[in-house]
Amino acid sequence: MSKDTLTITDNRTGRSYEIPVTHDTIQAMDLRQIKVNQDDFGLMTYDPGFTNTASTKSTITYIDGDKGILRYRGYPIEQLAEHSNFVEVAYLTLFGELPTQEQYNAWEYEIRHHTFVHENIKQLMEAFRYDAHPMSMFISTVAALSTYYPEARNIQDPKSRMKQIVRLIAKVPTISAFSYRHSRGLPYVYPNNDLGYTENFLYMLDKMGQTDYEVKSVLARALDVLFILHVDHEQNCGTATMRVIGSSHADPYASMAGAAAALFGPLHGGANEAVLRMLVEIGDVKNVPEFIKGVKNRERLLMGFGHRVYKNYDPRAKIIKRIADEVFETTGRNPMLDIALELERIALEDEFFVQRNLYPNVDFYSGIIYQAMGFPVKMFPVLFAIPRTVGWLAQWQELLGDSAQKIARPRQIYLGADTRDYLPMANR
Ligand code: SDX
């Protein structure tokens, strides 16, 4: 009769060990009993980039990389994109269930009425150069928010945690719009609490002197769906960072500033900006074959392609491609789309990409839509960070509620010098 265990024989000693298997996983600490000598440290696993290491148990997001499945709290991303809205998906991600109408109204009211930031934030932003990258401003300003809410350091208090969560979700559009307006030398537009989440964001970005300014509902809805697609993605680099910093019991503002910094990297959420720069560099469909040759010669990466988990088409990329057509009806077609479609066509046929399971990911098409909506390329990572705020905070909550978690402190394999005595300068 089969047992849910692994039998490991250590050929160095001939000893065998029986290790329990739960959820197709073994506890790394069960390996420490495997030693040659009693005073050995015991076996560890070596896993740079954590390619095969689970850091937590979670009930928030499920991804099947082979089948291209993404679900938030069990609901398929395709259905949420079709039927829900960002504020409702934020509620679902944080609380685990779809809200009743009463719960939704209360939640939406809370978010809508915490959009303002302390006036000092404007002076803080003024300290940045005119050409400061908006994502750097976002990271710095989120960290600075902790100076306005010192009670946030009381991370064991559920009420305080929820207050900071509402503040962060409500204020990141304001901070993002302010950083955009700063980079354009434009006056800040204060939040309009009569507007919905993405509508208000577009309002703060775009309104000038008009007294009757109206946000285009097609663009507000397209952005709302794009935000839904970016809410969470299990233990990605930025979220893992949120959890590592949060594991030291730092406040949510400091933890999220670190998560946003990780997201800014071009291999992660900074890829949407890198994709657009790549498309602009290619410039014309006729240059695509030459560019692909450079990728296959390892001279550069095809940004927006590949994924640690998806070895199939990223389901979010499929949905984003569909949104593109709706947006272009309002904004006009972005010529960069033709280059992107040709890149995708060639890559999906070429053995180099096929054998490495390289498909378009969430960042491949999102930037084309953002550019068509009028966002400068530098704003793209910020547009990723706004919705991912919800995922980071939901995962942070889960971390603090998980009694199995402790401060993150990985081990290492030391291969450096053995002990040696200090040498006076004259003897070196
Ligand atoms: C996001 O984790 C998440 O969930 C992230 C995210 C989220 O929602 O949080 O989904 C958001 O970050 C999406 C990914 C955005 N990044 C990019 O588009 C940048 C380009 N992609 C690559 O940097 C890469 O694909 C990663 C970083 C996304 C994944 O890298 P892995 O899993 O570490 O894979 P790897 O680097 O080991 O690559 C395996 C092979 C290598 O070739 P060999 O050495 O085996 O011959 O594939 C090659 C790589 O060279 N490869 C690529 C490539 N991606 C991988 N070659 C060309 N172009 C690429 N984009």
Image (tube, grey):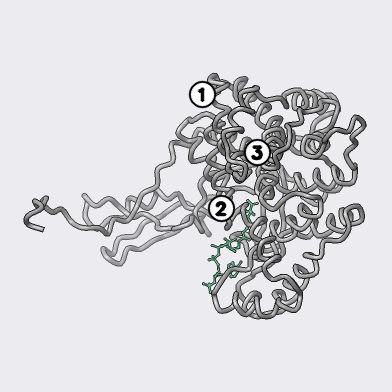
Q: Is mark 3 on a helix, strand or loop?
A: helix
Inter-mark Cα distance, 1 to 3: 18 Å
Q: Is mark 3 within 8 Å of ligand 1?
A: no
Residue 210 lies left or right of residue 317; in this view the side is right
Q: Quadrant of residue 253?
A: top right
Q: What element carries label 2?
A: loop
Q: In the image, ligand 1 is in what quadrant?
A: bottom right
Among numbered discs 1 and 3, the one appearing first in the sequence? 1
Inter-mark Cα distance, 1 to 2: 27 Å
Residue for badge 3: 389
Q: Where is residue 346 in the image (x, y as percent from the top left)?
A: 72, 77
Q: Is mark 1 on a helix, strand or loop?
A: helix
**Residue in front for this viewpoint, 317 or 104:** 317
Q: Do the residues labelled 1 and 3 touch (CB within 8 Å)?
A: no
Mark identifier at residue 153: 1
Q: Tell me what residue is drawn at x 61 percent, y 45 percent.
A: 131
